Image (cartoon, rainbow, N blue to C red):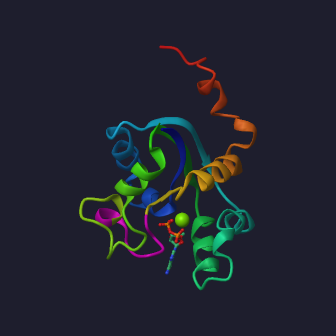
């Protein structure tokens, strides 16, 4: 099934100059960029984005990290985009991530793990709406107004 998923290139990917490589990893498996914004979240916005983790011991720290610097927020689309993106990202903790995955290769630790990807279609819908309310920025492509 054709799906959209939300990908975030996290601040550590910028400091490690890996932004282009991360995008290439996703494009190389046939996922297409449908929307793209560089955003600097406030702490409050980061907490809202990660609200499912409210109360967990890493909640404040991950919200600090995600609001510490700009991030690149992207909608990728393709067959089974949600699970395919998760697979090439690898597990949350790079120590457990599969060999060859983005996090295994480049993540420093549990928190500084380079990339976010929606974990389900339901999350993807909520997260895309969070960053692209009303579909602005992706809608034009969906309407097939983009022609080469
Ligand atoms: P994922 O990003 O793989 O979906 P989660 O949704 O469980 O992982 O967690 C959201 C983010 O919070 C992670 O990507 C990571 O940056 C951070 N995080 C999760 N668990 C921990 C932890 N135990 N210690 C530090 N940071 C964590
Ligand atoms: Mg998650």
Extreme-bottom residue of the structure: 57
Tell me what residue is drawn at x 40 percent, y 44 percent. Answer: 23
Magenta residue check for 103: no
Q: Is residue 108 left or right of residue 64?
A: left
Q: Quadrant of residue 61?
A: bottom right
Residue 63 is situated, as x and y percent measured from the top left of the image, at 63, 71
Which residue is nearer to you in this view: 125 or 21? 125
Q: Is residue 100 left or right of residue 94?
A: left
Q: Which residues are magenta?
A: 104-113
Residue 137 is situated, as x and y percent measured from the top left of the image, at 65, 34
Tell me what residue is drawn at x 59 percent, y 65 percent. Answer: 66
Q: Is residue 44 above or below residue 146?
A: below
Name the dominant secondary structure of the magenta segment: loop
Residue 111 is situated, as x and y percent measured from the top left of the image, at 48, 74
Which residue is nearer to you in this view: 27 or 68? 27
Magenta residue check for 112: yes
Q: Is residue 143 left or right of residue 99?
A: right
Figure quarter occupied by ligand 2: bottom right
Tell me what residue is drawn at x 59 percent, y 25 percent. Answer: 141
């Amino acid at each position: 099934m054709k799906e959209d998923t939300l990908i975030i290139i996290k601040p550590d990917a910028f400091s490690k100059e890996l932004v282009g490589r991360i995008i290439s990893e996703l494009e190389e498996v046939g996922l297409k960029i449908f929307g793209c914004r560089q955003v600097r979240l406030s702490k409050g916005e980061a907490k809202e984005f990660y609200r499912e983790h409210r109360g967990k011991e890493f909640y404040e720290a991950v919200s600090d990290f995600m609001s510490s610097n700009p991030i690149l927020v992207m909608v990728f689309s393709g067959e089974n985009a949600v699970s395919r993106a998760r697979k090439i990202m690898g597990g949350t903790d790079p120590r457990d991530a599969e060999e060859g995955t983005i996090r295994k290769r480049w993540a420093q630790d549990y928190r500084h793990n380079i990339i976010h990807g929606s974990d389900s279609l339901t999350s993807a819908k909520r997260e895309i709406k969070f960053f692209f309310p009303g579909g602005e920025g992706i809608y034009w492509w969906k309407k097939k107004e983009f022609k080469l």
